[in-house]
């Protein structure tokens, strides 16, 4: 033990803050953020091998029974007292999914007063879409096509979370989700690479803020799950992934690269194997690509027991081997298994893990603690007063309502049934989501509380002129019928002028470990929809969902359908805003709704095949299913407004893009309706012939514009060669001269206006 430090340690019985002011760690590390001070090396030199392994060990907080365990398999965390003992002994770098400033204060005080080296703890959490104020699930918010909105909600989440002691969020989740059976698409931005990248960047910026990571309201971002977690066979969570390197590079890597480019300094290895090698022990992924090719200098953390699961994968024989494989492949920090603290010291003494690798990983952890300002003030994010003051403030709740409203997608609006009149009509609100604070905040939310959410009935009653005009009948449970429910619902429908039918998935039907074999509205609710439709009353369907659904029967036949996802704390008021036209729907689908589950994985940017079926009827010996077209029922990008939008007047200049030049593409978008509208104008391209077959369409740009009734706007996009890149035969970024189709359109399947241009030879 270092003498100077142990003498100092003896003085640490006074207040933690005072102790810290004179601690060697602080003296060594100084005030520097951003760059790693050379003096970290001196601290490192004082650490025992066990203390080093401790810096690489993160556990779910045991405080209050361990909130983390509610959303994860139960796994040995110990008690709060055993965790404090580990902190004292330097066996823990921090905890995650703990609970508030009080807990953080108690733990940090022990670290600062009673541990030998007084290295501050790091507090992590799954702050995915809000903290105590819950914003829409990320999939819903991606549908806003407003990265600036996602940045604001991530910022707000960071402001709340940081006041409760949280330094590090396990977000954004940037997995591309091309298979809607997978339940975790709800945590990401959907199926498209460009939208995924833009949302990833926005969320990183939002969490980390623009005042540097040492700001007391900055929260370190973690891009997850690296990589291709959404590509599990059969859409089954945790399942094997076998995708080509090209698809990794074209589709699954880019959102991570964007997140890193935006300043994300941590990344979480995914649970899945990748062509036979688990991501958690994959040197090609974690070293060759991440470090050598991309120059990533941050920290790689395992997912929850990801290293332990190498045994389950059949990749490691035992805990010791799993530790060595994960650590040597590049996983710097182990989450929840305890494998690193248990096995790294022995592996180092046996020479199976070089000290240099251990030091490298510890340096990465210390560097982040420095950047977060923790060496300067370990309590900078821990302040019970600030915690209370910053949580669920009026501006937060207003943002929750705004973001929820702007995430609602109008799929259908036959006969302009929507918006509904605020007065004069009797409304029967029917369905398992018609009332109650359940299923508002979504499946992956650690800190939000149902009791803080405003439900649909409350929102609708507040929006209409006379709340007594609104009745509420559940009619059905989510997956089970209610005895007499349908009869009651039919009676309510008959007594009303309009039915608002809130059906879909409960929040436990998506999220982690919630893959579905059929992405449909559950049968009892489908029966409810059929019975209500048979009354002949006009029906507005409000879908609650964490993924794309294959709609059928009466749910699909309803004249109006709004996708309302899980919208968070202000769900009810936000839906009320859209239903009654206080604002028009402005979101678009971030995932394609297929005709049938059997089409999954379905994504609009699929390849053509050698026998594409032309638009229209199915033709023999062409690529289609017997039962459904090879298309989406409601494609990516689709969403209507309360206006009437038309696309016209494509301008492509001289239709030639010089090799080093740009091409300006314009179209005129008009709202000929009588209501204001916000349109998401989308630009797609298709490379007609290339050395690697290219998707039938790829989104390259979009713009959300507001159009008053009768207004028209020319929307201009500029493309350059960089927008035409793909990974070529030799896997390097490639652009080939030639002809490209281009569309400016309201969805991935709509024609909009289209033309062709040519990229000229250099
Ligand atoms: C999830 C991660 C999450 C972690 C910690 C895991 O089950 O896959 O996304 O960050 O738990 O809660």
Image (cartoon, grey):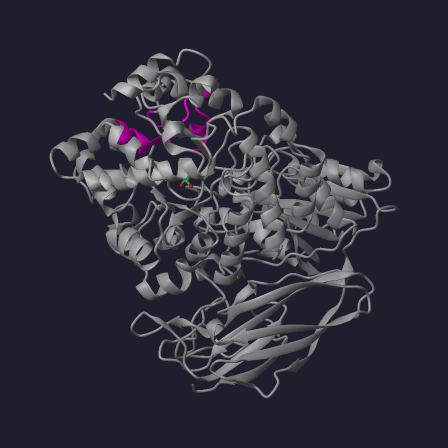
> Is residue 696 something one can see in this rendering?
no
In this rendering, position of residue 218 left or right of residue 282: right
Q: Is residue 306 magenta?
A: no
**Looking at the image, is 609 positioned above or below residue 149?**
below
Q: Residue furthest right?
A: 424
Picture coordinates of residue 381 (x, y %)?
A: 52, 30
Tell which of 759 and 756 is nearer to you: 759
Magenta stretch in the rendered image: 51-76
Q: Is residue 57 magenta?
A: yes
Tell which of 385 and 706 is nearer to you: 385
- The residue drawn where x is 33% and y is 39% is 38
Picture coordinates of residue 301 (x, y %)?
A: 35, 41
- The residue drawn where x is 31% and y is 69% is 731
The quarter of the displayed image where residue 80 is located: top left
Q: Residue furthest left?
A: 350
> Is residue 276 something one can see in this rendering?
yes
- The residue drawn where x is 48% and y is 28% is 377
- Of the 4 image quadrants, the one containing the C terminus is bottom left
In this rendering, position of residue 108 left or right of residue 311: right
């Amino acid at each position: 033990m270092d003498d100077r430090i142990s003498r100092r340690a003896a003085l640490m019985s006074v207040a933690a803050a005072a102790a810290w002011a004179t601690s060697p760690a602080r003296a060594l590390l100084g005030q520097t953020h951003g760059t790693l001070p050379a003096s970290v090396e001196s601290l490192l030199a004082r650490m025992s091998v066990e203390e080093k392994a401790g810096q690489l060990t993160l556990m779910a907080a045991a405080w209050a029974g361990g909130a983390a365990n509610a959303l994860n398999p139960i796994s040995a965390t110990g008690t709060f007292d055993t965790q404090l003992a580990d902190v004292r002994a330097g066996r823990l770098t921090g905890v995650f999914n703990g609970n508030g400033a009080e807990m953080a204060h108690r733990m940090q005080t022990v670290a600062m007063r009673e541990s030998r080296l007084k290295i501050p703890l790091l507090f992590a959490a799954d702050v995915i879409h809000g903290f105590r104020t819950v914003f829409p699930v990320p999939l819903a918010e991606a549908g806003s096509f407003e990265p600036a909105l996602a940045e604001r909600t991530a910022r707000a989440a960071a402001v709340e979370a940081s006041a409760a002691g949280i330094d590090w969020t396990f977000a954004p989740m940037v997995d591309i989700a091309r298979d809607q059976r997978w339940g975790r698409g709800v945590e990401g931005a959907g199926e498209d690479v460009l939208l995924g990248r833009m949302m990833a960047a926005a969320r990183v910026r939002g969490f980390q803020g623009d005042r540097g990571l040492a700001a007391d309201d900055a929260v370190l971002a973690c891009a997850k799950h690296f990589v291709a977690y959404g590509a599990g066979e059969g859409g089954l969570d945790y399942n094997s992934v076998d995708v080509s390197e090209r698809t990794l590079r074209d589709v699954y890597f880019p959102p991570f690269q964007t997140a890193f480019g935006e300043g994300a300094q941590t990344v979480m290895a995914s649970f899945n194997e990748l062509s036979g090698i688990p991501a958690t022990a994959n040197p090609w992924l974690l070293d060759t690509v991440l470090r050598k090719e991309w120059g990533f200098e941050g920290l790689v953390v395992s997912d929850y027991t990801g290293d332990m699961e190498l045994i389950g994968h059949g990749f490691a024989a035992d805990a010791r081997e799993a530790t060595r494989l994960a650590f040597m492949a590049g996983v710097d920090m182990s989450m929840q298994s305890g494998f690193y603290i248990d096995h790294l010291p022995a592996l180092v003494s046996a020479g199976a893990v070089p000290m240099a690798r251990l030091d490298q990983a510890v340096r990465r952890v210390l560097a982040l603690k420095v950047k977060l300002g923790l060496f300067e003030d370990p309590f900078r994010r821990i302040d019970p007063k600030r915690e209370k003051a910053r949580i669920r403030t009026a501006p937060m709740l207003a943002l929750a309502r705004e973001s929820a409203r702007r995430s609602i997608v109008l799929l259908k609006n036959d006969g302009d049934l929507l918006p509904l009149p605020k007065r004069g009509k009797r409304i029967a609100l029917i369905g398992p989501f018609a009332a109650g604070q359940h299923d508002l905040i979504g499946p992956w939310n650690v800190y939000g509380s149902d009791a803080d959410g405003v439900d649909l009935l409350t929102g609708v009653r507040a929006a209409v002129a006379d709340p007594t005009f609104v009745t509420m009948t559940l009619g059905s449970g989510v997956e089970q019928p209610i005895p007499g429910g349908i009869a009651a619902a039919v009676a309510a429908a008959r007594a009303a002028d309009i039915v608002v039918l809130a059906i879909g998935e409960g929040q436990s039907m998506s999220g982690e470990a919630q893959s579905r074999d059929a992405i449909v509205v559950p049968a009892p609710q489908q029966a409810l929809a059929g019975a209500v439709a048979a009354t002949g009353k006009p029906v507005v369907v409000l879908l609650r969902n964490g993924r794309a659904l294959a709609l059928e029967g009466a749910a699909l036949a309803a004249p109006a359908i709004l996708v309302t996802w899980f919208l968070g704390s202000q769900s009810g008021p936000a839906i009320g805003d859209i239903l009654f036209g206080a604002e028009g729907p402005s979101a678009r689908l971030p995932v394609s709704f297929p005709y049938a589950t059997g089409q999954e994985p379905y994504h609009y940017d699929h390849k053509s095949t050698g026998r594409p079926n032309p638009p229209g009827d199915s033709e023999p010996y062409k690529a289609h299913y017997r039962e459904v077209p090879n298309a989406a029922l409601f494609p990516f990008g689709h969403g209507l407004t309360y206006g009437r939008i038309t696309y016209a007047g494509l301008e492509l200049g001289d239709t030639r893009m010089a090799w080093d030049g740009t091409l300006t593409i314009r179209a005129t978008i008009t709202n000929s309706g009588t209501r204001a509208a916000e349109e998401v104008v989308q630009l797609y391209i298709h490379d007609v012939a290339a050395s690697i077959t290219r998707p039938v369409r790829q989104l390259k740009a979009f713009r959300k514009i507001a159009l008053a009734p009768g207004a028209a706007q020319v929307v201009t996009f500029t493309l350059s060669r960089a927008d035409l890149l793909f990974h070529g035969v030799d896997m390097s970024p490639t652009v080939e001269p030639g002809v490209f189709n281009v569309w400016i359109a309201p969805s991935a399947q709509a024609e909009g206006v289209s033309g062709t241009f040519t990229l000229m030879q250099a």
